[in-house]
C-alpha cells in the first residue's frame, strides 16, 4: 500500500506518523541460518558454492518485505537442482512458523526433474500423522519455461492425488505433451483443491485435449483452465465441450491458438454445452479459424447464455464483418445487460 501523506485533519494525531520501521526479523533469521547450515551439511554442499549465503539473503529479503513469495529467475546457482534441494529442505522446516510462504515461482530456471521432485517431497506433501504441525506447504506453484519434460508430471501428480491444498499450478512453456498430461491426469482426477491450472504452450495434442475433457473438466474442481498455444484441435475441444455441461465449477476456459478449424460437430458440441452449463463466464477461442457458420451458431447460443460475460474469437474466415461484430458485441459476445429506462 502506498504511504499516505501526514496531513492534519480530523483523524490526524500530532504532526504525523514517523517513518515506518522495518519489521524485526532477527529471531526468524537466527533459525534460518541454523537450518540452512544443517541442510548444507546434510547434503554435502561445498562451501565455495556459497548457497547458504545466497539463501540467507533471500530469506531475509522476503521476511522484511512480508511478501510470503519466493521468486527464482534464470539459471543462477540458487535455482539449479542442488540449490532447489537445499532451499526446499530448509523451507520445509521453517514454514509456516518462521517463514510463512504462499507462492513459489521458478521462471526460466533449470531445476530439473530432481528439483521438481524436491519441491513435491518437501513442500507439496501432506502431514503423515496428527502429531505433525499443520500443512506448511505452498499454495501457488509456478514453473515457467524451465525446460521440463513429461517425466516431472509423475511427482506433481502424486501431490495432486494426495489432495494437498495447492490452489495454482502453472506449467507454461514446458514440453509436457500428451505423455506428461497422461501422468498428471490421474492426480487431477482425484484432486479437489486446485483452482487454476495453466498449461499454455506445452505441446499438448488432441489426445491430451481428450484427457483434459474427461479427467480435468469432468472430475476436478478447477475454476480457471488455460490451454492457449497447444494443438488440441477439434477432437480435444469436442471432449472438453462434452464434459463442460457436467461441470459446475469451471469459470474460465482459454483454448486460443489450438489449431481448431471450426469443424461442425465440435462447434455444435460446444454450443450445446454452453446452453447446459451455468458456471462458465469467460471463453477464449481467439487465434483459431472458426469460420462463418460457427459465428452464426455462437451468435444464437450466446443470446441464451447470460452467464457468459466474456467471449473471444478470431474473425479469420468470416467474410460478413457485420456478423462478426454482432457476435463480439462490446468484446463480450453479448450485450452489456438490460438497457436503462429513458428519462422523461
Image: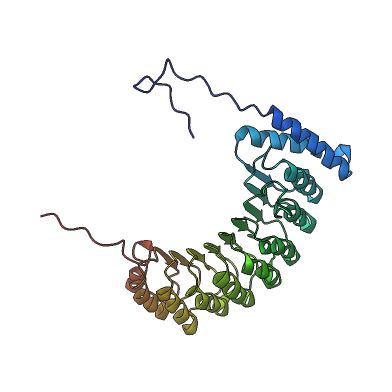
Answer with the quarter of the image where residue 71 lies: top right
Vertical side of 60 occupied by 326: above or below: below
Residue drawn at x 43%, y 79% is 272
In the image shown, does 216 or 234 lie closer to the viewer? 216
* Residue 24 is at least partly visible in this image: yes
x 79%, y 38%: residue: 35
State the quadrant of the C terminus.
Answer: bottom left
Image position, residue 146 (x, y; %): 71, 56
Asked whether, in this view, residue 104 is left or right of residue 13, the answer is right
- Name which residue lies at 59% across and 55% down: 167
Left or right of 57? Residue 266 is: left
Q: In this picture, is 249 found above or below 267?
A: above
- Depth check, front residue: 296 or 103: 103
Residue 127 at x, y percent in the picture: 71, 53
Q: Residue 253: x, y in percent?
A: 50, 66
Residue found farthest to the bottom: 265
Q: Where does residue 273 sit, x and y in percent of width and height?
A: 45, 76
Amino acid at each position: 500500500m502506498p504511504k499516505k501523506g501526514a496531513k492534519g485533519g480530523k483523524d490526524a494525531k500530532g504532526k504525523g506518523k514517523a517513518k515506518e520501521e522495518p519489521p524485526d526479523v532477527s529471531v526468524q533469521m537466527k533459525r534460518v541460518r541454523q537450518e540452512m547450515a544443517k541442510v548444507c551439511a546434510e547434503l554435502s554442499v561445498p562451501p565455495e558454492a556459497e548457497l547458504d549465503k545466497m539463501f540467507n539473503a533471500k530469506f531475509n529479503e522476503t521476511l522484511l518485505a512480508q511478501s510470503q513469495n519466493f521468486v527464482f529467475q534464470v539459471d543462477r546457482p540458487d535455482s539449479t537442482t542442488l540449490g532447489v534441494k537445499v532451499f526446499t529442505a530448509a523451507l520445509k522446516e521453517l514454514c509456516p512458523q518462521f517463514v510463512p510462504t504462499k507462492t513459489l515461482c521458478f521462471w526460466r530456471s533449470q531445476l530439473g526433474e530432481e528439483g521438481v521432485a524436491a519441491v513435491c517431497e518437501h513442500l507439496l506433501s501432506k502431514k503423515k500423522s496428527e502429531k505433525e504441525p499443520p500443512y506448511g506447504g505452498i499454495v501457488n506453484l509456478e514453473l515457467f519455461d524451465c525446460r521440463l519434460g513429461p517425466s516431472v508430471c509423475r511427482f506433481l501428480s502424486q501431490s495432486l492425488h494426495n489432495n494437498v491444498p495447492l490452489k495454482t499450478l502453472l506449467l507454461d512453456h514446458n514440453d509436457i505433451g500428451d505423455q506428461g498430461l497422461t501422468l498428471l491426469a490421474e492426480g487431477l482426477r482425484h484432486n479437489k483443491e486446485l483452482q487454476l491450472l495453466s498449461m499454455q504452450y506445452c505441446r499438448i495434442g488432441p489426445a491430451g485435449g481428450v484427457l483434459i475433457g474427461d479427467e480435468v473438466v469432468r472430475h476436478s474442481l478447477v475454476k480457471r483452465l488455460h490451454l492457449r498455444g497447444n494443438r488440441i484441435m477439434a477432437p480435444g475441444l469436442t471432449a472438453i465441450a462434452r464434459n463442460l455441461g457436467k461441470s459446475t465449477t469451471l469459470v474460465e476456459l482459454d483454448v486460443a491458438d489450438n489449431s481448431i478449424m471450426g469443424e461442425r460437430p465440435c462447434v455444435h458440441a460446444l454450443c450445446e454445452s454452453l446452453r447446459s452449463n451455468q458456471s462458465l463466464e469467460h471463453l477464449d477461442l481467439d487465434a483459431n479459424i472458426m469460420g462463418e457458420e460457427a459465428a452464426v451458431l455462437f451468435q444464437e447460443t450466446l443470446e441464451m447464455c447470460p452467464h457468459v460475460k466474456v467471449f473471444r474469437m478470431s474473425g479469420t474466415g468470416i467474410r460478413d464483418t457485420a456478423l462478426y461484430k454482432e457476435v463480439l458485441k462490446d468484446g463480450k459476445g453479448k450485450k452489456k445487460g438490460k438497457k436503462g429506462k429513458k428519462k422523461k
